[in-house]
Amino acid sequence: MLSKTAENLYWSARYIERADSIARLLEVGYRISLIPNTQSGYNNEWESILETSGIKDDYMLNFKEIKKENIEYFLLFDARNSSSVKNCLKNSRENIRMVRTAVTLEVWNAINLCFQEIEEISKKKYFSRDLPEIIDWIKKQVNLIRGTILNTQLINDGYDFLILGTYFERADFTARIIDVKYFILLPSSSYVGSQIDNFQWSLMLRSISSFRAFKWAYGNKEISSVKIIDFLILSMMCPRSLFFSIEKINHHLKRLKLHYNQKSKAESKIHLLNKKFSKLNVNEILDYGLHEFLEKFLNDLSDIYSNLENKYFLG
């Protein structure tokens, strides 16, 4: 496979996953904004959403002030935001269009139709009351595209790059959304373990479609931050956990190593990270510091991607 083809497949899948992630971040902001806040805390959860998505500077250049409706539009449709949902879907479509013969007709149609529909949605005047409906539409479209890839693509090296794009982005997003909850949204350290704390954690679970899965895994016992950290970082039963994403990346990089009969630094490093996660427990993470742990994880993930890029995309 040509390096450019591999890169296009990887980034098309990554942009699709990013569109889903942005929608879920918006849902976190929307759900948490329904909770009465305190004067002592981080009073603007919408600003924290901008921080998490890494686009606060771009937003402030265009809008000057933190305003809920402007943030929603900027994250959904604004052409000036390279990570808006509309731009993510546009970029995914463009990457796939350049390698049309590497995907099935069904995959192309699903991505193309999704972009055409968001084009039409974005032409209408945006109202904040429409946010839940738009978020629901985005999640449904992304699930349709994912299902089409899983059920129609040939399981070859092209498929490996599509799946790698998905799970690199998912691991990055899960780490960031845990961090925004634990490090930013909680009003005060005195609230840790309180009813407010646990309620925010439950809302976060719902926003990443993991609330019922969590209940199945832990029973109908009280929700606690320790259990949720275990579920979203270390559980192999949760398809959005960091460990699950690492395992998927490890599996598909190993497949590429066997397919091309060549070793890679990316495969070696993800293998070590996978081994490390298999031995971790929640107490070790908390002793290290959750924010520091997530920050290191994101740096490790970025380093592994750089190795992947150098090996397969830069020729």
Image (cartoon, rainbow, N blue to C red):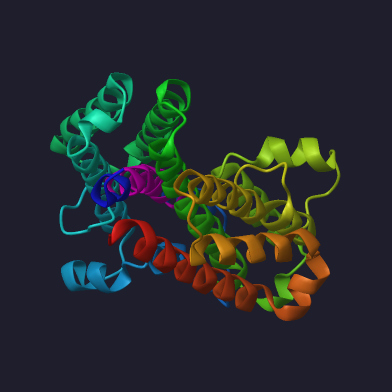
Residue 78 magenta-drawn?
no
Quadrant where the N terminus sits is: top left
Where residue 48 sits in the image (x, y, percent)? 44, 67
Asked whether residue 288 appears in the rendered view, the answer is yes
Read off the magenta span. Answer: 8-25
- Observer-nearest of 302 and 135: 302
Percent across and percent down for residue 299 are 50, 74
Q: Nearer the viewer, residue 135 or 311?
A: 311
On the picture, is 308 further left or further right than 226? left
Q: In screen coordinates, is 55 left or right of 303?
A: left
Q: Is residue 52 in sight in this rendering?
A: no
Residue depicted at x 26% and y 27%: 108
Identify the residue shown where x is 73% and y is 70%: 192
Q: Position of residue 291 (x, y in %)?
A: 61, 75
Q: Nearer the viewer, residue 24 or 293?
A: 293
Give the position of the C terminus as an image quadrant: bottom left
User: What residue is shown at x 15% (from left), y 53% (from top)?
Assistant: 79
Image height of 128 relative to 171, above or below: above
Residue plotted at (85% across, 39% down):
219
Query: In the image, is residue 20 part of the stretch drawn in magenta?
Result: yes
Q: Quadrant of residue 201?
A: bottom right
Q: Is residue 121 left or right of residue 36?
A: left
| Depth check, front residue: 142 or 179 | 142
Q: Residue furthest left?
A: 123
- In the rendered structure, the answer to whether residue 62 lies left or right of residue 55 reads left
Displayed quadrant of residue 216 = top right
Q: Is residue 305 above or below residue 125?
A: below
